[in-house]
Amino acid sequence: MRRAISTIAIGLTCVSGQALAQADQSRGASTGDSIDEIIVTAQRREQNLQTTPVAVTALSAEQLAGRGVGDLSGLVNVVPSLSMSAQTASQGGNAASFAIRGLGQQRDGNGTQPAVAIYIDDFYYPTIAGNLLAALDVSGIEVLRGPQGTLFGRNAVGGAIRYQTRKPDDQFGGTVAGTIGSYGRADLTGVINVPLGEKLAVRVTGARLERDGWQRRIIDNDRNGAMSDRLLRGQVRFRPVDDVTVDLSHEYTKSRLDGYTVYIPTIGVTPGPLVPTAFGRLYNFYADPDYTQAYASVSPKLAYGASPLSSDESRAHNTHLVVAADISDGLQLKLLSGRTIIRNIYANDADGTPLPVLLAIGDNRIANWSHELQAIGKSGALNYTIGVYHYIEKFSGHAGFVSYNLAGAIGSTAVNLNQRGSQSDSVYANISYDLSGRLTVTGGLRIGREEASAAVNNGVESNKHWSQFLPMLRAQMQWTPDVMSYIGISKGFRAGGYNILPTGALIPFGPETVWTGEAGMRLQTLNNRLRFNPTIFYTDYDNIQLQRIPAVGPPAPILENAGKAHIYGAELETQLNPLPGLSLTAAVSYLKAAYDKVNTTFITTATPLPRVPKWKVSLGTAYKLKLANGSSVDFNADYSYTAAQWGSDVDSNRLLLPSYSLVNGRITYHHKDSGWSIAGFVTNLTKEVYFNGALNFIPNAGNLTYNVGRPREFGVEMKVQF
């Protein structure tokens, strides 16, 4: 680790020196529009992205719409080092597990702490169920890469996704938008903001999102993948006095998916009488473990299996209260109190046969409460954030598997009432000091206690607890107003917990830790027409929590602490505005990972780490054409490439997700006066067949489960602002 960080420091110092000379030479006249300043709050205060010593990608509401990011799943096409695995085995299709720099959640289900935390207005969202939040009435989304612990209430070992909603203001107005598109897409959204006097304002957001299924079932000719989402968000902002702001919000979401869009190849065998098909074999079956593949004349738009039994529904209530008081010009106190209640019901037929041989079922309820007190201040050259955090989470649910015999009668069941709990109490601080007007040093520390508990069928509760000590140290050099570089090291921590087996057994697993060294440069030059932001990092990953599924008994995924690994890589985000109205963006990441030591039998040091695509590339073009009548037309085109990656640590030498490329486009006409716009768009223009998740759900049964990405889709959106 010390050698890696020394190399990082030397490399960034050399690059910064060259960039300094280039930036000085670039100060002069130029053609073209300058790049807009990006303001981020990744360090709990407003900062220019180019002076923020953090690996963060910030996307405004306009950028999200232009690049086709309709929900959080779309971020993987534009953010470097971010991967996503759709969940099907025991969690449902409305869930996704995110990974940043190879650090992600390995368990395919509820009740464990994600490696990548999702924050809704700085409140932690506790589960993967229903976490594909739609980008509706948001001010922006930020993705932070690397361990988070000295600035946020709930720590995260891999990174964070900050989902930030628009707040009520003192201007009356709103929007109404409707979208129609392929596969029965019909969306209707609305926002209204109403000031009630000088001290009070209310904002209400609502949405109804509908899509029909797109994957046709061979058995009954019906379709998988129908989606139905509802959202209702109410916010109140009250300013009793000039220096105090009270924000109260409640959000209700409902998300339903009918029939998972999966295909299930076989391994080393040709299907027999249990899977009679017109083609004689399942689509894309594996002839042997070395990935010799034979393709039948079948499309991933066709599905086998008794999928009418498969469905997923998540309902969530998020209630947040934030009280911010400006004590003085240099000190703000903030109280954040929130509660989240989520219910997730799912049934998943994942055996890959025309009969419901094995059905995963679940009815889960998750509730959390959090309270946080922050002091955010500045005194001369000193900036600080200090916080105290208390968090409680309760999980309960029926989960298990129902198996059927060949005549269709129920053969056996394995269903348990599970209870899990966790509690986190911590204090954290992040303090930076400007030593010279150019050199700033930052130190951070998180000290806390994590507790996990579990019980089955109202039995005796078991519990464990662990201590946290998470330091962070960083140095930042502002070479010129246009060039900054930084280097830092931080520690991340993810608590342990319990595996609950269908047999009722409780198996504990321990916490995992990471040490990450990171260095980066932020350059803006050519008269603010070029932004060039490279970052490099090295991570030591210890006591890794890996998932496996026992070969005997019902297929219940369990976590084990498997050993040590290292992950290193580089990221680049850049933007160039060469001509008036034209913007070119690129984001590239390179990742490399390997196990250093293993202490379990289901992997070796040669086993690949899951969700570590070697290369990710995202290219974007945006052009604004101003018309003679004062209206304008926006043209957006985006290309993304994701290299091959392993879909899971369970049987990972078979679960290879091939590389894929996606092309999206959008054209929007904005009327100059009346506040309306109309847009036409296409996603997956080239009809790429790709997979965004995989799992060996039933070991030794001869099948794998793959999640199929969405096909090509067209749509038209009409929006009216008032």
Image (cartoon, rainbow, N blue to C red):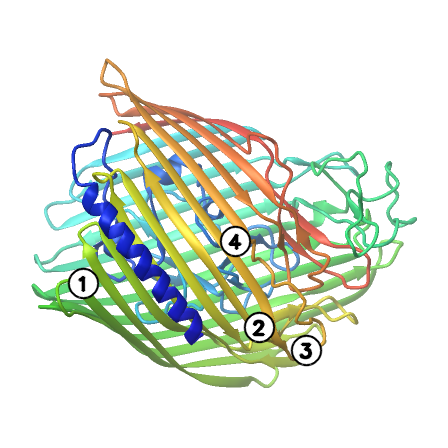
**Coordinates of residue 103 in the picture (x, y in percent):** 51, 64
Marker disc for residue 324: 1
Q: Are marks 4 and 1 in contact (CB under 8 Å)?
A: no
Mark closer to the chain start, 2 or 4: 4
Can see residue 57? Answer: no
Mark closer to the chain start, 1 or 2: 1
Tag 2 secondary structure: strand
Q: Is 627 located above or below residue 139 in the figure? A: above
- Frontmost of labels 1 and 3 is 3
What is the C-alpha distance between the residues marked 2 and 4? 18 Å
Around disc 1, counting alpha carbons within 10 Å, would you say few (fewer than 14), some (14 to 19), or many (20 or more)?
some
Tag 1 secondary structure: strand
Residue located beneath label 2 in the image: 545
Tag 3 secondary structure: loop
Mark closer to the chain start, 1 or 3: 1
Front position in the image: 160 or 132: 160
Instruction: Identify the residue at the far top of this view.
Output: 628
What is the C-alpha distance between the residues marked 4 and 3? 26 Å
**Coordinates of residue 555 in the picture (x, y in percent):** 73, 66
Tag 4 secondary structure: strand
Marker disc for residue 100: none
Around disc 3, counting alpha carbons within 10 Å, would you say few (fewer than 14), some (14 to 19), or many (20 or more)?
few
Residue positioned 22% across, 55% down in the render? 47
**Disc 4 residue type?**
Ser
Residue located beneath label 3 in the image: 600
Marker disc for residue 83: 4
**Disc 3 residue type?**
Thr
- Frontmost of labels 1 and 2 is 2
